[in-house]
Image (cartoon, grey):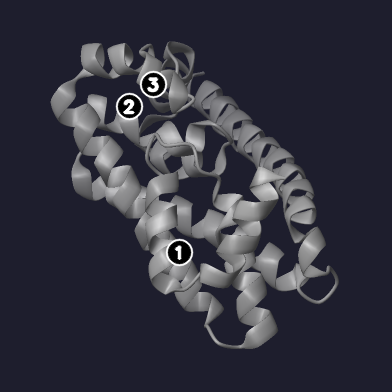
Amino acid sequence: LFRSEIFGFLLDQLNYLNVFILMAIESTFIPFPSEIVVPPAAYHAHATGEQNVFIIILAATLGADAGATINYYLAYYLGRPIIYSFANSKWGHRCLLNEEKIHRSEKYFYEHGVIATLTGRLVPVIRQLISIPAGLAKMTFWKFIMFTTIGAGIWNCILAAIGWYLQSIVPEDQLMNKVSEYSEHINIVILALLGCIAMYFIIKRTKNKK
């Protein structure tokens, strides 16, 4: 019920600035799903014609960049001990953080290299936290922001396409449930694709070594 009330409020308030702000929050360590921002904004844009869906995607991507940059610099300057201490603190738990999630994002980053800041934006749970290991590893900022922008842009295009498509077939009061359903299916497909890509490079590297 609470999520439905938030969703109904957002649907009426999702101008470009609010999309930017909410997506900036979503890309930090504060738990806030992008699925209740971009699809409703695209849905509303299609229904009313008052906003441009491409500008919505741009605002969402710039917001994601802003939030990810906050995570990056916090990790860059605070370092691993403080980041892990916060994740294990009461406030960290209120933000749905814990040591396991940070460790998982670090493991993903070190296994996939700098490209992880792109592919990680497409992976559930890792999506919001991949900027933290990038900062801890002191990754070059221009590479970080470039890959983050591409990854966030792809994800926001997918979310906007869902909202745009659903406007013609789903009434507003059913939108949230359908977005969740579609997002789950898309996450599965993305994970499968990333797995296939990873296998391809592993096999290619093995052949090159031989």
| Label 1 Cα neighbours within 10 Å, binned few <14 / some 14-19 / many ≥20 | many
Q: Secondary structure at mark 2?
A: helix
Q: Is residue 202 above or below residue 8?
A: above
| Label 2 Cα neighbours within 10 Å, binned few <14 / some 14-19 / many ≥20 | many
Disc nearer the start of the sequence (1/3): 1
Report the amino acid beneath label 2: Pro
Quarter where residue 173 is shown? bottom right
Disc nearer the start of the sequence (3/2): 3
What residue is at 61 percent from the left and 88 percent from the top? 49
Q: Is residue 108 above or below residue 34?
A: above
* 104 sits left or right of 41 in the view: left
User: What x and y, as percent, mark residue 111?
Assistant: 44, 22
What residue is at 42 percent from the left and 32 percent from the top? 129
- Residue corresponding to mark 3: 92
Label ID, residue 19? 1
* 95 sits left or right of 9 in the view: left
In the orientation shown, which residue stands out farthest toward the left?
Answer: 77
Q: Secondary structure at mark 3?
A: helix
Count of number-bearing discs: 3
Report the amino acid beneath label 3: Gly
Could you tell me how far apart the alpha carbons at marks 2 and 1 are, in whole angstroms? 26 Å
Report the amino acid beneath label 1: Val
Quarter where residue 105 is shown? top left
Label ID, residue 133? 2
In the orientation shown, which residue stands out farthest toward the right?
Answer: 169
Q: Is residue 134 above or below residue 57?
A: above
Q: Is residue 137 visible?
A: no
Could you tell me how far apart the alpha carbons at marks 3 and 2 are, in whole angstroms? 16 Å
In the orientation shown, which residue stands out farthest toward the bottom?
Answer: 49
